[in-house]
Amino acid sequence: MNADAIAYTESIGHSSSISRKSQAVKSSGLTKAEDTLIARLRRGDEGAFDELVTQHHGTLIRVAMGYVADREVAEEVVQDTWLAVIESLNRFEGRSSLRTWICGILIHKAKDRGVREKRHTTFSAFESFDGDNDEAVDPIRFQQSGEWAGHWAFPPQPWDDQTPEKLLASKQAVDCMQQAIAALPAILKEVLILRDVEGVEAKEVCEMLNITETNLYVRLHRARERVRVAVETYLEGGMKTV
Amino acid sequence: MKDHPSQWIPIGLTCRDVAEQATDYLENRLPILTKIRVGLHVASCAGCRSYVVQIGLVSSALGSFPKLYLSPVNRLHLRQQFAAHHTN
């Protein structure tokens, strides 16, 4: 079965219309590559474990940093997660992708660690951030009344010649983006890190975080806007000092 | 402002509406008619054009952040744990 067919059988989930052949592949819920990797891991293949760690470690660190105070604690949480993965691998049933399963373990541990150390903002952010109702863009930037109500009062100025590569080449720009991410409430940070920084597909992010796709994109837009404002402030500050 | 280009075609969207939908527009999540209306507004409004471009640029830049790697010491430690688990 080709990759598209595998992706199709995974995407339709529990649909009753799948063929017998598709069900045979779907029974594991995994791609062939993941099936092979898990078989190697269960045989104790250290090379397979290295591959797994190489594939996912960076993502896990960034996700963990969304819940705990610093990189050092995030590293500890990720180490704990890997140990749990080693212990639980034989019980993994393949209902989700390997990455979703591992991230689920990590998020549980990271939230728990954040609560215990009282250094994080996860739950206070959940309580105080009305993510589905707040507007992403500061309303003050729009005309408040009159014929042009709702149109820009303070429109964004063009970022002449800016490209992602140019932004990333500036240490100050990268620092300001990282600071903006660090300052995000956890529910915005987690979607931004998973979707934009780590490039996880929307559907998988929803599965990991147990949120709807609508929630995901509402939060993602608010997070992107906060980072955009940080870059805007940095660029305008830079332009003023020239 | 009376000649604001975004009002040349009566598409019934304000800049505020467009800014709220920028990510949905970029991710191709809008119903086709809404997408066309947003597209027409963006094409005729410099502020919204800059806004949509900037949201897309930020998203792309975030996707190019350098990868984080495991330290060799921690990698070795994990590998030993994995080997020990399978030996027992």
Image: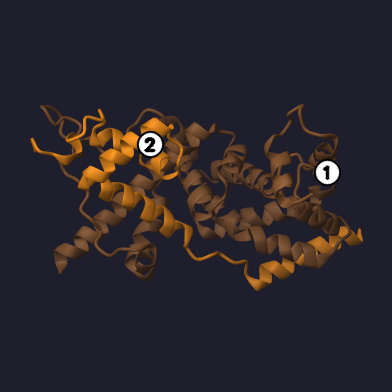
Chain colours: A brown, B orange
Please tell me whether mark 2 or mark 1 is closer to you in this view: 2
Q: Secondary structure at mark 2?
A: helix
How far across and down, in percent of the image, does residue A24 sit?
85, 40
Residue ID at (83%, 43%): A91
How far across and down, in percent of the image, does residue B34 sit?
37, 32
Using a 10 Å C-alpha cutoff, classify the residue at mark 1 as few (fewer than 14 neighbours), some (14 to 19) or many (20 or more): few
Q: Secondary structure at mark 1?
A: helix
**Residue type highlighted by circle 2:** Lys
Residue ID at (66%, 45%): A100
Label 1 sits on residue: A91
Label 2 sits on residue: B35
Figure quadrant of the C terminus of chain A? bottom left
How far across and down, in percent of the image, does residue A35 sit?
80, 52
Using a 10 Å C-alpha cutoff, classify the residue at mark 2 as few (fewer than 14 neighbours), some (14 to 19) or many (20 or more): some
How far across and down, in percent of the image, does residue A152 sit?
18, 39
Chain bearing tag 1 is A
User: Is A115 positioned to the left or the right of A142 in the image?
Assistant: right
Q: Residue furthest front?
A: B9
